[in-house]
Image: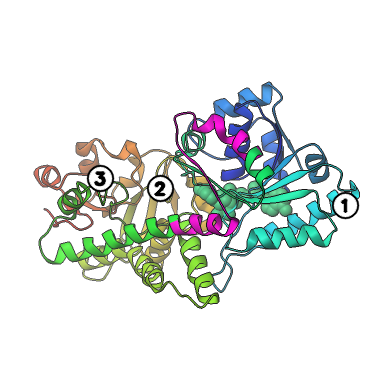
Amino acid sequence: MKLSVIGTGYVGLVSGTCFAEMGNHVICVDNNQQKLNALKNGQVTIYEPGLEILFHRNIEKQRLTFTDDLKFAIQNSDIIFLCLPTPQDEDGSADLKYVFGVAKNIGKILKENNDKDYKIIVNKSTVPVGTSKAVTNILSEFGIKNFDVVSNPEFLREGFAVEDFMKPDRIVIGSNSKKAFEIMRELYEPFVRQGNPILEMNPESSEVTKYAANSYLAMRITFMNELANFCEKVSANVDLVRKGMGADSRIGKRFLFPGIGYGGSCFPKDVNALIKTSEEFNSPIKLLKVVDEVNRQQKLVLVKKLLQHFNNDIKNKKIAIWGLAFKPNTDDMREAPSIYIIKELNKLGAKVSTYDPAAMENAKFYVDEIPEYCNEQYEPLNNADALLILTEWNEFRNPDFDKMKSLLKNPLIFDGRNIFDIEKMEELGFIYYSIGRKVVG
Ligand code: NAD
């Protein structure tokens, strides 16, 4: 099939590459020249395990190309995927200017083309309910008739994006057109050979499904975070509670890990967008307001513990940080708890020294006051008063504890991801704070 993907970020680049891998011809469009130049020069612009090999293979086979020429892309494709940003607006709603802006340009191009070839415009961006209808109206205003708009939300996880795209749990397709369903099913069938479902529904249900899934997951994390804070007060261990809960098949084991609040480019904005849309339709989902509020507080839970430990004075203390990305296996820093923590530490006069395997370059755009980015895991620990663990990268899980102890001024660790066993840390002689478990040492 001939596809174009408008917006070559995390979702667009992965979708485009994986569609090409299945033999489709994909034209990726972006208006960021720097990104385009890098992609054209064979550089993968995001860190995503497994992407590079597919990227190079499909460029070589000439199934994957990059351009800023929207007109060329539209004229040479049957299915047009919108993988554009839908950032949070000031009032919490999703800002649709990128989606609507491109929809208008597509309308103009199709009009110039005399509307001669049938096109499917697919919204892969996360967009509020009603957006498919709004995009349809935009195209109709240009007099275009030979098209369908489809909602096809993306559920990939950063860090596992290729794996998730190639073997999705489900594909959701929202449309009112039989023809569009048939074509979309044909496109996606190779991805669900194991039998996972392609769920067909009306566009409104599809649009709500994406927000519902993300908000539910955010709520689950938030519940565990509040529960963890409670466990600390009553000598319970949240890890044991988590296992006790998760063994119940009605609950399940996944997404029950407490930490320092959810971040990333999706959960925070999607929770807020659903709050906003539900209010607009006079059916507020009140639970989500609490989820958002608790999550903001949770991002600073380690700073609170740190202050408590140092009697509210961390001025000039050297704080080492392991992990900046909002989660492991990604370089994405959007809404990462580390941003909020580092800003607060800077405000309190602490000196921050940090290491992340992939996100340090991106971090520079979000936090300008980190005095020290280190190229090696143990470097920030040198003469530091404490270590904060903010991202559970695998390489932090089995570190050289003797080396850590010898480098740190105090054997003091604040672990926001519960990556170490508390008994082991006690045995090793660390003072070890974590989330929802007793302090040892
Ligand atoms: P991103 O910011 O990484 O990528 C968006 C891309 O669109 C950028 O490369 C940008 O330069 C490009 N762009 C902006 N305006 C353009 C225009 N007019 N023409 C061409 N290109 C343009 O965003 P993302 O993380 O890929 O997210 C895209 C959408 O997918 C969002 O709605 C997001 O909520 C949703 N989503 C993201 C994820 C994720 O894990 N990142 C997962 C599921 C859904």
Q: How many marks?
A: 3
Taking 307 as reference, is 253 above or below it?
A: above
Q: Is residue 127 located in the magenta-colored stretch of the structure?
A: no
Q: Is residue 433 left or right of residue 143?
A: left
Q: Quadrant of the N terminus?
A: top right
Q: How is the image coloured?
A: rainbow
Taking 41 as reference, is 317 above or below it?
A: below
The first of marks 2 and 1 along the sequence is: 1
SS category of the residue bearing label 3: loop
Residue 419 got which mark? 3
> Which residue is painted at 76% across and 49% down in the image?
147
**What residue sits right under mark 1 in the picture?**
111
Q: What residue type is disc 3 on?
A: Ile
Residue that extends furthest to the bottom in the rendered view of this protein? 282
Q: Is residue 145 visible?
A: yes
Few, some or many C-alpha atoms within 10 Å of disc 1 (few <14, some 14-19, many ≥20)? some
Taking 153 as reference, is 165 above or below it?
A: above
Q: Is residue 433 left or right of residue 106?
A: left
Few, some or many C-alpha atoms within 10 Å of disc 2 (few <14, some 14-19, many ≥20)? many
**What residue sits right under mark 2 in the picture?**
327
